[in-house]
Image (cartoon, rainbow, N blue to C red):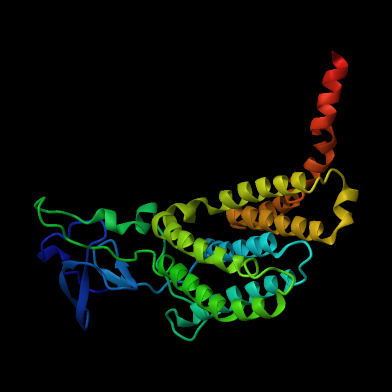
Amino acid sequence: MFRSAVDIQPACLGLYCGRTVLSVNGSVETYGDCGVCPRGQRTDDNKICRECMGSPDRYDWLYLGFMAMLPLVLHWFFIEWYSGKKSSSALLQHVTALFECSIAAIVTLLVSDPVGSLHIRSCKVKKLSDWYTMLYNPSPDYITTVHCTHEAVYPLYTIVFIYYAFCLVLMMLLRPLLVKKIACGLGKSDRFKSIYAALYFFPILTVLQAVGGGLLYYAFPYIILVLSLVTLAVYMSASEVESFKDLLVRKKRLVVLFSHWLLHAYGIISISKLDKLEQDLPLLALVPAPALFYLLTAKYTEPSRILSEGGNGH
């Protein structure tokens, strides 16, 4: 055990202020002044800055997966939105977007500590305030502020920004050449609109992570479930899907349905964390339930039918 020098030094104020270890001589540690911990460290219970040597748990990886999916899903949405019904280039653009995001994710893991490995070391997230250390800088004399802002959730906060940067760079390197070569069925002003859309949503995602990263960390499973349910209902309503036969008319509808089912499953897994497999795995049987409920009840909620029955009643 190291002998603590905290008892003979002035108290280290602030929730996230700590003393760095200057040297270790046998069982005795020498500490520096109270201040901000270096990157990759956070304070322990004795207000000493310690290296983050843990690994992300399952929930942390699910959160990173969610943040990685956001630009990919938005890419796919805008590619589909602007490709047009007659365009044959949409599929290749979808594959390219998947390739860009996959390579960006791999490169991000490789450049993170330890460099060259797909494994990353991290600090354990203990509470919501860990994401917002800038709000907890102490002012001992109510005049001077001791700045102790650091990444207490290392690297869950900054790794998302690095990933978005690589996504943007790879998109600008690959997509314009691809679109210019294959998107001949679109007008000159339309073929690059999916790329222009990405130039808008990447800054929005960056601000979202910067401001709401901690809130997203705790709320993302429920966000996935709610948004996937709403978007599936909107899509099926807009596509006038009212029966199982309508789903089988076009393969694209089945692809959209299965994609939403994957999102449902991801949300359920994120909520349950699969801590108890015998209890949590049966929950995945609920994945098709929303779509089945919609298909079974759609014919009863057809507006024209309701209006006609209302007119007949009078």
| Farthest front residue in view | 188
Where 246 falls versus 51 (above or below)? above
Along the line of sight, the residue nearer the viewer: 186 or 204 = 186
Q: Residue at x 85, y 36 (%)?
A: 299
**Quadrant in the picture for residue 256:** bottom right
Residue at (84, 19) in percent of width and height: 311
Quadrant where the N terminus lies? bottom left
Q: Position of residue 221 (x, y in %)?
A: 57, 52
* Quadrant in which the C terminus is drawn: top right
The reply to whether residue 289 is visible in this rendering is no
Q: Residue at x 54, y 77 (%)?
A: 172
Instruction: Pick whichever, 145 or 130, lies toward us.
Output: 145
Residue 126 place in picture, x, y as percent: 40, 57
Where does residue 101 sit, x and y in percent of width and height?
58, 73
Query: Among all residues in the image, which is located at the extreme bottom?
Result: 116
The x, y position of residue 103, in whole percent, is 58, 79
The structure residue drawn at horizontal position 70% and vertical position 50%, both measured from the top left corner, is 283
Nearest the eye: 184 or 148: 184
Depicted 53 relative to depicted 64: above or below: below
Q: Residue at the top extreme?
A: 314
Residue 92 in view: yes
